[in-house]
Amino acid sequence: MNTNVISSFIAIATSISFLLLSPPSKSFYHSLFLSDSLSCNESIANHLYILTKRPHVAGSEANAEAAAYVLSTLTSYKVRSHITTYEVALTYPISRSLTLKPTPQDSPVKFDLHQDIYDGDPHADVADEVLPTFHAYAKSATVAGPVVYANYGRVQDYAVLKQMKVNVSGNVVLAKYGKIYRGDIVENAYAEGAIGVLIYTDRKDYGGGGDAKWFPDDKWMPSSGVQVGSVYNGAGDPTTPGWPSSGLCERLSDDDAEKGGEVPLIPSLPISWADGDRILRSIDGQVANDDWQGGKDAPVYKVGPGPAILNLSYTGKQVITTIQNVIGIIEGVEEPDRYVILGNHRDAWTFGAVDPNSGTAALLEVAHRMWKLQEKGWKPRRTIIFCNWDAEEYGLIGSTEWVEENREMLASRAVAYMNVDIAVQGLGFYASATPQLDELLIKATKQVQDPDNSSQSIYQSWIRSSENPKIGRLGGGGSDYSAFVQHVGVPATDISYGEDYPVYHSMYDDFIWMKKFGDPKFHRHVAVTSIWGLVALQLADEEFLPFDYLSYANELQRSVEDLKIELSEKGIKLFPLFNSIKELRMAATKIANEIKKHNSLGATRQKCLGFCIKK
């Protein structure tokens, strides 16, 4: 027989043997990850129930117990896991008081600053473990003065007050939550000369307004509900800016930390909409604009100042305490030194059923499904790291300290960071990302069923209201992606189901609220788990990283076009910037074409081998 013919037979036989004996493709495992056989809404619900039995603020015994649960669960899924600790500066309330004197003739009104338990509250026996309502890192001080109503406390709101000839200096500001971060509300008030700040949840925004019922009968914030939170404007331990808070590290003094400009310099307190309503009824002066007014049955909002006098007193303590990040690792086979990172924080101001433990439950479910894939033979190309952060609520502390400690390693080895702070808070899919990950997110949503309409994908429901899915950008310090994006330049995503929920950061953010109003069947949790895990799998397994830098170039082009308009009358030329974007687009196009060509050749090769088997 001709040696060429023999060689051909050997090659074909070898190819057939390879196809028959080789493991399933990575895409097979990715499809399996989404299958009903691996999805379990009951296990997600069980994780959430266990994690939210007690309030678990950072630094507490209950939060350490929650860390132990996450660690043991990951370990049970054969994920190699450990706890990384840091010693950080956290603050807790010692005393608070708030007294209102409506007029010189009236007796003072003392507010109890207390959130009430509700009828049938299953957490009533641990309600006393909820910290008194406060602002983390608020200035300890006692102040008294007339009250000025400043709407949402934004810069533009103070501009309106100036137009009305209302002087804020020397007064106590009353502002409502809703448009900007509470730390900015305090900072803006300080810049205007205020001596203290009260931030309340207006019933129109959080209480459903008018005749609406509130939790537990409906989703809305009860009248005594208070949104607590941090007023620190930085990220990471404020006493160790730029370096990790480990061991006996050097720390800034309290005075030096204040000089840094991230810690408030006037006292503040969060209050309920019932208390805010009482104060608003005592303010006189000019009537506020229509868009500053409340809803049905609200009093007419006036801006003051006074005649009501508020006496605000707050004393807090700052302590150096231990926080615990839980880290789990599935090591990659071909590129073990490249990291695909999934992150969620664990600490909560109260029970945290929505924020953050809906995300924690989803993180554990991703790990569970990946364990099942490993049992069926899947091995990731790159290393996957699960991160369950601590002390996010105080100022992204756990994640920031970890990034500071591992900065050089992450800058060179991290492929991407995928964050889920809140997995579920209501209807609709929401996503933010750095632009090179846009297409990957869109692709994933096309493969996952809409949890509220089984006849369509999440992508189809996502685009119902617009021609293109809207993907936000990761600016500011909104969650734990911040250090990855802003400190080391790692591509990142942040996803959730729903946007905003009324009982945010209050003691009513519990398992009952989630079971009744957030996700009764936990199908939305399953959907978030599917998208989160699928994106992670594709980043971990694709031979060529599935980044789309054409999307990045287009985003930059739009931003610079907007900047050009803003600078049109200032004589500033942006030609170098436009040229750089053009070069990026050309390079991105070349890379995309090379990858497409490679994938096409691979598909042809597989097709030819399949033809040989049939013959």
Image (cartoon, rainbow, N blue to C red):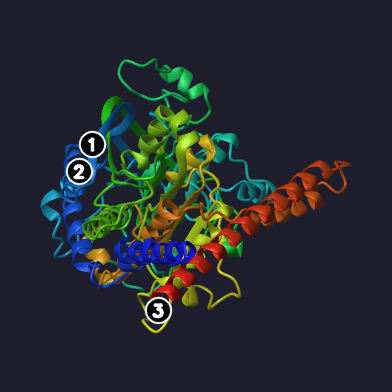
Give the position of the N terminus as an image quadrant.
Answer: bottom left
The amino acid at mark 1 is: His
Could you say which disc has been placed on residue 614 in the image? 3
Q: What is the C-alpha distance between the residues marked 3 and 2?
A: 50 Å
Question: Is residue 287 among the parts visible in the rendering?
Answer: yes
Q: Where is residue 155 in the image (x, y as percent from the top left)?
A: 62, 46
Mark 1: secondary structure:
strand
Mark whose residue sits in front, 3 or 1: 3
Where does residue 158 sit, x and y in percent of width and height? 62, 46
Q: Name the residue under label 1.
A: 82
Could you tell me how far apart the alpha carbons at marks 3 and 1 are, in whole angstroms?
50 Å
Q: Is residue 443 above or below residue 495?
A: below
Q: Name the residue under label 2.
A: 71
Say if 86 sits above or below 449 in the image.
above
Depth check: 275 or 52 in front? 52
Image marks 1 and 2: residues in contact by CB distance under 8 Å? yes
Is residue 42 found left or right of 280 in the rendered image?
left
In this rendered view, identify the residue nearer to me: 19 or 37. Answer: 19
Picture coordinates of residue 33, whole percent (x, y): 31, 65
As helix, strand or loop, the secondary structure at mark 3 comes to helix
Q: Residue at 23% of width from left, 71% of height from top?
A: 37
Amino acid marked by disc 3: Lys
Which corner quadrant of the image does residue 368 belong to?
bottom left
Q: Residue 476 carries which label?
A: none
Amino acid type for the residue under numbered disc 2: Leu
Which one is nearer the viewer's eye here, 249 or 101? 249
